[in-house]
Each structure stands twice: as C-alpha cells, then as structure tokens.
C-alpha cells in the first residue's frame, strides 16, 4: 500500500525534480498529482522516467482531502495561501519555501542531521525544507560536530543560477550568448551581469549589511544543528547553471586532525569524500549534477586558529538543496509516522 502524493509547483525546476526523484527512488505511491498555478493548468509534466505523463491541476481549486503528503515547491506566496489549507485537510505539507523555516512549531529537517525533530510535525501538519546552501553545509558539519563540537563556522558560498529558478538559468544563457556575438548583456533577474562575473548579493539586504540568504544560513544552521554554533556567511551568485559550492572554515572546541575528519566524513551518511591532494582530486559543480551526495574535498588543517579545519563542499542544489531533501523527509515521515508501503 502506497501514498497519495501531491507535488505543488510541478512545472518549476524544483517541482519537476521532485517528480523525477520520487520516481528514481521508487517512493511508494498509489496516486500522484501535479499541481501548479492557474496559468499552468493542463500543462503536461513527466513523472520521471516512468513513461507516465501528468496533467497539471489548478492549485486554486485543488482539494487536498484524502491525500497523504504534499510537496510544495511553489514559493512563499502560494504556500502561505494553500499550505494551511492542505494541512487542515489532513495532508502533511513538506514545504521548500522559506515561509515556515523559523516557525517554532514547524520542524526544519535534514534527515541525515536531525531526523528526530520530525516528530513535532503534528503541531501544524507542516515540515520545512531548509535553504539549499544550508542543507548541504549541515550535512557536512553534522558528523564533525558530533566528533569535536563546532564553535564557529565561516562560509563563503558559490551559488549557481538555478537557485534563482528558470529565469536565472535563462539569463545566464542569454547573456553568455549575447556577449559572444557582441550584443548587450542586460541584467534583468540579477542585479548585475552574471555571465563571466560573480555577484556578492543573494536576496534582500538587511539592516546589518548582510543579505537575507546569509541570515538564513546562520539561523537555519542553529535551528537544525546547534543553537550555540556561531556562523558567518558571504553568499555569492556565480555563472554556473547547477550545483552550489561552499568554502568552509570551521573552528572546534576539541582537537581534530584533517586525517580524523576525512575518516569521519568517509563513513558519514549522505557524504561522498573525494579528497586527493593532486590535480583534479576534488569535486566541482559540473561533476555533482544529478547526484544525491554532498561531496567534500580539500580537507586540511587551519594553523591560524586552535582546532581549525578548512574544507570544500559541493552539491546539486536542485537535488540535496531542494527536491531530494524533500523526498527524503517524506521517506522519513513514512517510516516514523504514516506507516504505509
């Protein structure tokens, strides 16, 4: 016996990826519905490689009664309107937007990091999926925190344009093409030219000079992993289509060597350690696309602080940073609470 699953925002990058991953992982499904905005009503979307095509239904009049799980990839606006409606109908919402992440009555889950927190979902019948850059970082931090207790993290991100949706990917493609033929590279989605450039600005600026994306990494890490960890982030958009990268500098309370960290990471769930100190002995965004893992490379000791390590972390942001994590939450929910399949 399987579940009745709704994917909301099924025509977007993350929604399509959710359908693909549900199929790839053979999630136990009796029925699946693709749901999107009124303008996408009737649009065909593939259910992964199953050969099954789904016709999108209109979110405005979709009845969630009788459905088990709704994976939301629709943005904060539609989520604010329709997620409470789904939850009230008895359908557990797993939301990819930022809307509920810091709500104390909504668990914020990365299954490899804080699976027990999912038990609090019944307060609102909603579970939050973290920010894409946070998700891969805490997967890498968790086993190291368990071993030596992290005090402080300094992270610089190199985030792909797919994190800004289809419009971001289109803008990188169009600007690159225009530059090659000598046409203007007009910025529309981003604040400056993204082709052959980097932009140290993701989301809106806050009063302290940080951006909301940077604040998310700080606040979400504390909620998911440990409120005592100090985090400072600089989030940068780079001209890469898919795959977020992060340079992490970590300060621990207890001593830990690079070799010990490598041994720990090699055995940790969700992580693939690729760390050879030679040309090409590390993973880049191009190589992580389509993979489930969070890749870690360049593990080394930082001699400028006591008990310091630096490392490089790469993951497919449409997968672990969004769709995969949501499906993993659904799997965890099924194992611990819904008990089907």
Image (tube, helix red, strand yellow):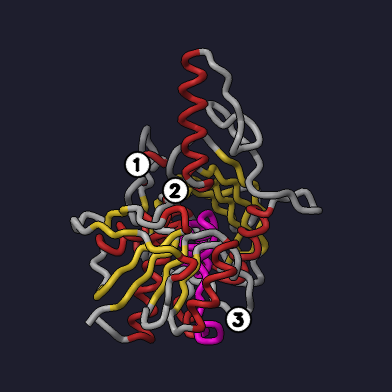
Compared to residue 274, the image places residue 170 above or below, namely above
Q: Are marks 1 and 2 in contact (CB under 8 Å)?
A: yes
Which residue carries the number 1 mark?
287
The stretch in magenta equals: 120-147
Q: Nearer the viewer, mark 3 or mark 1?
A: 3
Magenta stretch: residue 43 in it? no
State the CA–CA distance, disc 3 to disc 1: 38 Å
The residue most toward the top is 182
Q: Say what secondary structure mark 2 lies in.
A: strand
Q: Position of residue 159 (x, y in %)?
A: 53, 44
Q: Which mark is residue 105?
A: 3
Q: In terms of sequence position, does the residue under pointer 1 or pointer 2 come before the other?
A: 1
Q: In terms of sequence position, does the residue under pointer 3 or pointer 2 come before the other?
A: 3
What's the residue at 46%, 22% (across, down)? 177
Q: Position of residue 28 (x, y in %)?
A: 25, 74
In the picture, measured across the screen, residue 67 lies left or right of residue 312, that is left
Q: In terms of sequence position, does the residue under pointer 3 or pointer 1 come before the other?
A: 3
Compared to residue 19, the image places residue 311 above or below, namely above
Asked where in the image residue 320 lies, by quadrant, the reply is bottom left
What's the residue at 44%, 60% (across, down)? 36
Numbered-mark total: 3
What's the residue at 49%, 47% (across, down)? 165
Q: State which quarter of the image contains the N terminus.
A: bottom left
In the picture, measured across the screen, residue 92 lies left or right of residue 309, that is left
Q: Residues within 10 Å of mark 1 (few under 14, many from 20)?
A: some
Q: Is residue 260 visible?
A: no
Q: Are marks 3 and 1 in contact (CB under 8 Å)?
A: no
Which residue carries the number 2 mark?
314
Q: Position of residue 73 (x, y in %)?
A: 47, 60
Q: Say what secondary structure mark 1 lies in.
A: helix
Magenta stretch: residue 139 in it? yes
Q: Nearer the viewer, mark 3 or mark 2?
A: 3
């Amino acid at each position: 016996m399987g579940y009745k699953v709704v994917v909301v925002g099924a025509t977007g990058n993350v929604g399509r990826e959710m359908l693909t991953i549900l199929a790839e992982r053979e999630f136990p499904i009796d029925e699946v519905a693709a749901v999107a905005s009124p303008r996408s009503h009737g649009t065909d979307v593939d259910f992964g490689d199953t050969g099954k095509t789904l016709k999108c239904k209109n979110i405005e009049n979709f009845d969630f009664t009788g459905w088990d799980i709704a994976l939301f990839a629709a943005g904060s606006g539609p989520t604010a309107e329709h997620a409470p409606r789904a939850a009230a109908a008895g359908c557990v919402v797993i939301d990819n937007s930022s809307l509920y992440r810091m709500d104390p009555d909504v668990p914020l889950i990365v299954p490899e990091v804080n699976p027990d927190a999912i038990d609090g979902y019944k307060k609102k019948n909603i579970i939050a999926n973290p920010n894409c850059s946070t998700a891969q970082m805490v997967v890498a931090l968790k086993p190291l925190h368990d071993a030596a207790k992290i005090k402080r993290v300094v992270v610089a991100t190199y985030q792909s344009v797919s994190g800004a949706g289809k419009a971001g990917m289109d803008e990188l493609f169009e600007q690159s093409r225009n530059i090659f033929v000598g046409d203007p590279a007009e910025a529309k989605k981003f604040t400056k030219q993204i082709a052959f450039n980097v932009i140290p600005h993701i989301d809106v600026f806050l009063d302290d000079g940080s951006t909301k994306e940077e604040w998310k990494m700080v606040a979400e890490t504390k909620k998911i992993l440990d409120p005592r960890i100090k985090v400072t982030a600089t989030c940068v958009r780079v001209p890469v289509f898919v795959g977020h990268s992060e340079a992490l500098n970590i300060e621990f309370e207890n001593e830990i060597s690079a070799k010990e960290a490598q041994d720990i990471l090699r055995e940790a769930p969700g992580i693939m350690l690729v760390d050879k100190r030679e040309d090409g002995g590390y993973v880049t965004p191009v190589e992580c696309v389509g993979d489930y893992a969070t890749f870690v490379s360049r593990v080394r000791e930082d001699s400028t602080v006591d008990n310091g390590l630096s490392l490089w972390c790469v993951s497919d942001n449409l997968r672990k940073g969004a769709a995969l994590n949501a499906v993993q939450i659904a799997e965890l929910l099924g194992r611990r609470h819904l008990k089907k399949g």
